[in-house]
Image (spheres, rainbow, N blue to C red):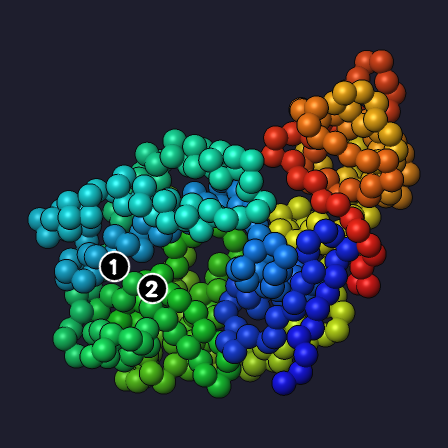
Amino acid sequence: MSDPRTFDPGIRGSVAVLPDVPALWSYSSLKAVETCPRRYVLSRATYTDLWDRTGYPEVPSPAALFGDVVHDSLEAIVRALAAQGCTSASGPEAISVLRELGGYSEVAKAMLAKRLARLDDNPRLAGGGRERLQDQLEHRIPEAREEVQHYLHRMTLVPRQSAGSGPNSRGASPRYARGVGSHPEATLQADELRAWGRIDLLTVRPVQVDITDYKTGAEDESHFDQLRFYAVLWDQDNVSNSSRTPLGTLTASYPSREVTIEAPDAAQVQTLAQQLSARVTTADELVQSDEPAARPGDHCAFCAVRPLCTAYWPTTPEPASLKRGSWFDFEGTVVERNGIKSWWLHDLGPRKGPLLLRTTSAHHAFEPGQRLRLLGLRRDEDPDSEVAVAVLAQTSEVFLVTGESDY
């Protein structure tokens, strides 16, 4: 067994043990490594000095968490409806199922609690970050309920037939022959392609199978690429699709409408499978590289590992060019204290200009010579100063640079 690969990004407490190639690739993981190999690798590395989980701690956005809550609520309700043979979210049987679940709002609250529980030991949410997220999202429970109802109003479920309608007798495997009926959160796996996916709603009919994926964000062409990816999985999964049921429709379901496209035919599926095989080979090589490439772009603004990435910081905007109230990231060296709650920093970016950093508390103590990477500063102004001014807000993050990265 070879020694684990490690990477020191030069940030205090962030030495990474890099991951191996995954046994199976999903649509999202393939897209992630293709967008930026470095982000993929560092996001899935192990950081023993930070916490005992896999991956770099993320600061989830309220919008993303809200979408997760809606999606999780849909999954729980559809799974319960399908288990009872309901064909829709209305009718006596469905009403009884919803009553047992506690109603839409209670389901959403329970899903929110599960999501928040995963953040309990997140070191990047110390100082009340988790509580702020909880407060924001609890106020949006009525909105989540309404979105879930919109999805369910359009949904038609097919009762399952007894044969092949559930997992094996032990109930231990998520993969089994999918018989006629609606199967929420169905796991599909193409072993030869080393690819897998979890389908939001797989509806098997006697003559075809229809695939539906719930989307809580804006419409995007990538959603249809993902549906075609799932189509390949269904075609290549000899366990789930043991009856060789042909593909029917592919649907992206949004809060207000559904967009359905035709499934690829047999020749198109084979072409997509060949393309997928090539993508998996390339993805393996990207992960195994001694120096995973960084590909800066608009996606960097939402990257959880950007404080660790030397390629990102030269791309940050010049503070003096930003309007008051703008949010930005900044890398600089502490020069000296300006006042009880303010400091002078020297910009390490291409502009090499000074920055007056104001803090909301006198407890923030920096030392001259420290090199800092600051996430989420708010641009401010000072009528008595011509230099750029920024505020270290309650949600801002400070990372101490202790060395230089080899990347």
**Nearer-the-camera pick, 232 or 177:** 177
Secondary structure of the residue carrying tag 2 is: strand
Q: Position of residue 247 (x, y in %)?
A: 35, 74
Q: Label 2 neighbourhood size at 10 Å, few (<14), some (14-19), many (20+)?
A: some
Residue at the extreme left of the image, as rendered:
92
Q: Is residue 328 above or below residue 259?
A: above
Q: Quadrant of residue 210?
A: bottom left
**Nearer-the-camera pick, 217 or 403:** 403
Q: Could you say which disc has been placed on residue 79 in the image?
A: 1
Q: Position of residue 312 (x, y in %)?
A: 76, 51
Residue 35 visible here: no
Q: Position of residue 96 (x, y in %)?
A: 11, 48
Q: Quadrant of residue 383?
A: top right
Whichever of labels 1 and 2 marks the residue nearer the N terminus, that label is 1
Tell me how many marks there are: 2
Question: Looking at the figure, which quarter contains the C terminus?
Answer: bottom right
Q: Which residue is mark 2?
A: 185
Question: Looking at the figure, which quarter contains the N terminus?
Answer: bottom right
Task: State yes or no: discs 1 and 2 in contact (Cβ < 8 Å).
Answer: yes
Q: Amino acid at mark 2?
A: Glu
Residue at the extreme top of the image, as rendered:
384
* Residue at figure coordinates x 35%, y 52% from the top left: 72
Secondary structure of the residue carrying tag 1 is: helix
* Residue at figure coordinates x 21%, y 42% from the top left: 103
* Residue at figure coordinates x 38%, y 34% from the top left: 138
Please indicate whether residue 382 sits to the left or right of residue 76 in the image: right
